[in-house]
Image: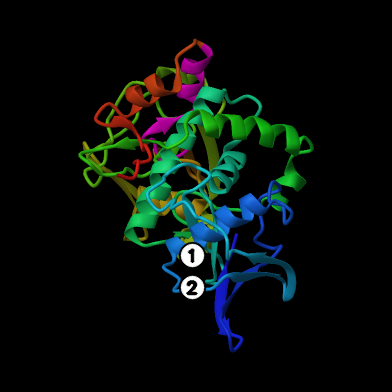
Amino acid sequence: MFYNYEIHNNGKEDILYLYLTMKYEFSDDFSFEDENDLRRRTNNFIQSNNIPFRGSHIYLIVDGIIVKSIDISNAVYQSFSSSYSTDNFMVSIKMEDDSLCEISLRDYLLSILFCYFSFDIHDEVLKCICVLYSGYAYKMMEDQKYIVAEDNFIRYRPFLYYKTIFSSFDYIKKRLNTIISAVDSVFLDYENNYILPFIHYCNSGKTITNSLYPYLSSVQSLWDMASFNYVNVHDFSYHELSTIFKLSLKKKHTISIISKRNSKRIIFENKMYSLNEIKTLLHLKSDNIYFIIYKDFLRVITIGLGNSYGLSIFGANELAKDGIPYYAILNYYFPKTKLFKHVKELSS
């Protein structure tokens, strides 16, 4: 919501100027006429950023124009610093131009859910995604005080982008808000730590582990084998591969594959590449890759869509259609974790 502030003294008292821009204003529910909402949001911003403001007048600036003044001289504020609710917890987004934009956790989760949304995805699966990204927001704000708009997990986009994608934007937003409220402040915990939101669309029939993330488990997900993304086949001529890898591949004998029990590598012209490097360079859907070397081309077969870590959207959707609730789905795909909910502490 707010991306910057300034404090100026008019000779009598400090005045706080809070800056917004319509480019980063994502909440359609925000109203300049709603004094209570403005007070709550401005107070959250002041507290979460430790702004040394003790005056009574605040001005809201949108794209260089003062659009609202707030007199807080008679206001009695309630502290939300310990609240993790979706409407009170504030998330700082580091945008592409390195500016920081602060929004509510609800607005953050709305954008995330819009990114994953499909009318084929069950509400219980969307709840799972919401829980995972709530924990991610708590973790990142605790660890580094912001979330990069385009990080390794998902690209954060403003609502205006999704309005161009979905003709029924308002209906979907209402549905997503209901989902977010249903899992308000819920997150997954592993040994008193938040976990990262590992999500993929489908796998080869089971999820996989990673030694760097001990909370990831390998569990069967046979439903995924029925997904239309289960198998993808791509053929690359040696000329195409030469251009992509900046090599001179003229025949199949310049390619060899090293396959071991727990790893696989491919060699082009004596240069070795990992499967993850192959996935990136060839823009493949998965790093579960198999190769067939032909005389004139290389056939690349991928299994699944994504990295096969954590929650399978396709598998989870099949469970949800069978009546399994979100918390049981999360317990199935993350059996080493526990589900918790932040509860606001009462003052003494």
Q: Residue 53 carries which label?
A: 2
Quadrant of the drawing holding the C terminus:
top left
Q: Is residue 67 above or below residue 313?
A: below
Along the line of sight, the residue nearer the viewer: 234 or 156: 156
Q: x, y percentage for residue 118?
A: 64, 31
Residue lying at the far right of the rendered structure: 167
Which span of residues is magenta-colored? 305-321
Q: Name the residue located 51 percent from the left edge and 21 percent from the top edge.
A: 317
Q: In this view, does 172 lie above or below 223?
A: below
Going by the numbered disc 2, the residue's amino acid type is Phe
Nearest-to-viewer mark from 1 and 2: 2
Return the residue at label 1. Answer: 46
Label 1 with label 2: CB-CB less than 8 Å = yes
In this picture, residue 279 sits left or right of residue 188: right
Count neighbours of disc 1 (C-alpha within 10 A) and say few if under 14, some if 14 to 19, many if 20 or more.
Answer: some
Q: Quadrant of residue 286?
A: top left
Along the line of sight, the residue nearer the viewer: 155 or 163: 163
